[in-house]
Image (tube, rainbow, N blue to C red):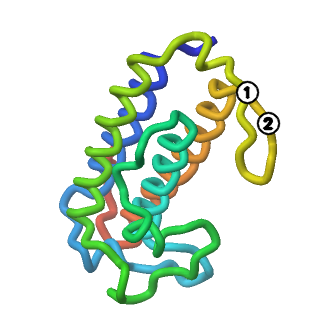
């Protein structure tokens, strides 16, 4: 089984990658769209935060990213194409990500083996252990973190940060 510390380190690595991918970008850069149905850097980071909220719910902990702030970044939400209502500044999203990571690290550091084995029905009743859900949420987190590389390049940076 993957240890809680490995999960802490893995989720933290994703935060560090996001910080590297957003280094030097402006809020306006974070709103750049690709020329097909996709979503911008701003949405990706906000959506990753909604994923962290799901993890907090799974672990019976209050999310750090309020539901009101998370609303614009929900699954299946429309692409962000302008700096509209509900769109948070890039700097705020990064700060929220740091808060969410600190909370997640604290909760995972204290988790017991019994809690990791607890069965939970989530997302329409699908039941898996907490450990299996954590692995799923890590996959989801990493999937979107990988997309940030493309969105950085869409800003015209033409560099390699990882």
Q: Quadrant of the C terminus?
A: top left
Residue 123 placement, left or right of 143: right
Where 112 falls versus 158 (above or below)?
above
Q: Secondary structure at mark 2?
A: strand
At x 60%, y 82%, the residue is 36
Residue at mark 1: 119
Looking at the picture, tell me which residue is in the foreground, 143 or 133: 133
Residue at mark 2: 127
The quadrant holding residue 14 is top left
Looking at the picture, tell me which residue is in the foreground, 108 or 17: 108
Residue 62 placement, left or right of 89: right
Looking at the picture, tell me which residue is in the foreground, 122 or 97: 122
Where 158 falls versus 141 (above or below)?
below
Tell me residue 94's x, y (percent). Answer: 27, 55
Q: Secondary structure at mark 1?
A: strand
Where 6 falls versus 162 (above or below)?
above
Residue 128 placement, left or right of 44: right
Dot 1, how many residues are within 10 Å of its Cα: few (below 14), some (14-19), or many (20+)?
some
Gap in Å between the C-alphas at discs 2 and 1?
A: 6 Å
At x 48%, y 24%, the residue is 7
Tell me residue 98's x, y (percent). Answer: 27, 45
State the mark number for residue 146.
none
Q: Quadrant of the N terminus?
A: top right
At x 39%, y 18%, the residue is 109
Tell me residue 148's x, y (percent). Answer: 44, 57
Total number of numbered labels? 2
The quadrant holding residue 154 is bottom left
Dot 2, how many residues are within 10 Å of its Cα: few (below 14), some (14-19), or many (20+)?
some
Tell me residue 122's x, y (percent). Answer: 71, 45
Q: Are marks 2 and 1 in contact (CB under 8 Å)?
A: yes
At x 68%, y 17%, the residue is 117
Q: Earlier in the sequence, mark 2 or mark 1?
A: 1
């Amino acid at each position: 089984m993957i240890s809680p510390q490995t999960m802490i380190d893995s989720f933290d690595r994703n935060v560090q990658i996001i910080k590297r991918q957003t280094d030097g970008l402006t809020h306006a850069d974070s709103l750049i769209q690709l020329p097909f149905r996709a979503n911008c850097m701003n949405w990706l980071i906000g959506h990753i935060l909604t994923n962290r909220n799901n993890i907090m719910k799974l672990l019976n902990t209050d999310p750090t990213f309020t539901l009101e702030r998370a609303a614009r970044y929900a699954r299946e939400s429309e692409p962000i194409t302008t700096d509209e209502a509900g769109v948070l500044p890039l700097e705020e999203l990064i700060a929220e990500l740091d808060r969410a990571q600190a909370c997640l690290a604290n909760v995972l550091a204290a988790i017991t083996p019994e809690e990791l084995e607890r069965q939970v029905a989530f997302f329409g009743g699908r039941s898996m252990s907490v450990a299996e859900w954590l692995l799923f949420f890590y996959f989801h987190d990493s999937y979107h973190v990988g997309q940030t590389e493309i969105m950085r390049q869409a800003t015209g940076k033409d560099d390699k940060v990882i």
